[in-house]
Structures are given as C-alpha cells and as structure tokens.
C-alpha cells in the first residue's frame, strides 16, 4: 500500500529527496489541483529546452541542472496562490525575470492559477540559465 503524500505549507508536496526523473515526476504527481498542470508544463518545457537535463528533488522541490555542469540553474516550489520558479543566476538573464530576491543573483517567476505565463520567454530564460554556472546547493 502506498503511503499518502503529505502537503506542506502552501500545498507543497513532501517528497523524499532523490536523483533523476522518477522523484521529480512523483513531486509533480503530488502537486495539488491546478499546480500539477503547471508543474507538468514547466518540466516538459525545461526538458525540451535542455536535452539531457539533470533532475533531483531536494528540500521538497525539483531542481534542474545542465547535463555538462555541476550545480543547478532552476527550481520550483508550490505556494498557496502560485508556483514560484527560481532562477539561481536570474540576475544574469536578459531580460531579468520579474521577481526580486534578497539573494543578489537570484530572480523569481511566480505563476498564478488565473494567468498563463509567457512560455516563449520562459524557454529563453531556461536556455540562458542552463549555460551559466550552476548553483551548488
């Protein structure tokens, strides 16, 4: 019998850490409601934009890394009213993603339930971010 997934604050799934696509897909499958669709779309866009992308779940969030580098260029996390995408070197992207951070290089993109996001711009950011030095976390 499968143990039910616990949802943490904001509806973020509590998923055991693990490397590879399997843990990331388990995280996405556990995302509640409309957030699951956003998670599937983000994962598909990243995988298409960065062939061979490395994936891991840690700290109850999926992380993505370039296949030829160490570290991570992107992560996302569920909050009550949006899914927050983190670009670890986002301040180096052109244009810079809209969400500021207290960490100098980090920028965010919040994707709310009621609004589509600019997928073309997201893919452009992903491609740029995957070419920058990944963040070792």
Image (cartoon, rainbow, N blue to C red):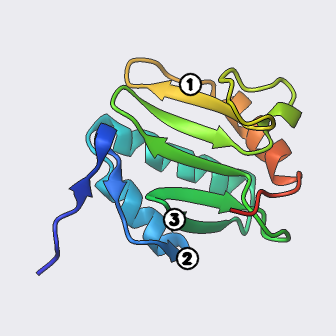
Q: What is the secondary structure assignment of the residue under circle 3?
A: strand
SS at mark 2? strand
The image position of residue 27, as x and y in percent, is 39, 60
Residue placed under numbered mark 3 in the picture: 58
Residue at 62% x, 47% y is 45
Mark closest to the chain's N terminus, 1 or 3: 3
Residue 102 vertical placement versus 20 (above, below): above
Res 19 label: 2
Q: Name the quadrant containing residue 126.
A: top right
Q: Tell me which numbered mark, 1 or 2, is placed earlier along the sequence.
A: 2
Residue 49: x and y, percent? 73, 51
Establish if 104 lies above or below 76.
Answer: above
Picture coordinates of residue 80, whole percent (x, y): 33, 31
Q: Which mark is residue 117?
A: 1
Q: Is residue 45 left or right of residue 97?
A: left
Q: Nearer the viewer, residue 90 or 34?
A: 90
């Amino acid at each position: 019998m499968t143990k039910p997934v616990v949802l943490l604050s904001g509806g973020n799934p509590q998923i055991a850490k693990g490397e590879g696509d399997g843990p990331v897909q388990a995280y996405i499958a556990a995302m509640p409601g409309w957030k699951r669709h956003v998670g599937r779309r983000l994962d598909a866009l990243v995988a298409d934009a960065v062939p061979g992308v490395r994936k891991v779940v840690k700290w109850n969030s999926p992380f993505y890394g370039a296949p030829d580098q160490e570290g991570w260029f992107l992560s996302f996390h569920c909050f009550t009213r949006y899914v927050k995408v983190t670009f670890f070197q986002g301040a180096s992207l052109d244009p810079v993603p809209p969400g500021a951070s207290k960490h100098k290089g980090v920028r965010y993109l919040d994707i709310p339930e009621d609004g589509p996001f600019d997928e073309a711009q997201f893919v452009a950011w992903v491609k740029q971010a995957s070419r920058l030095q990944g963040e070792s976390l």
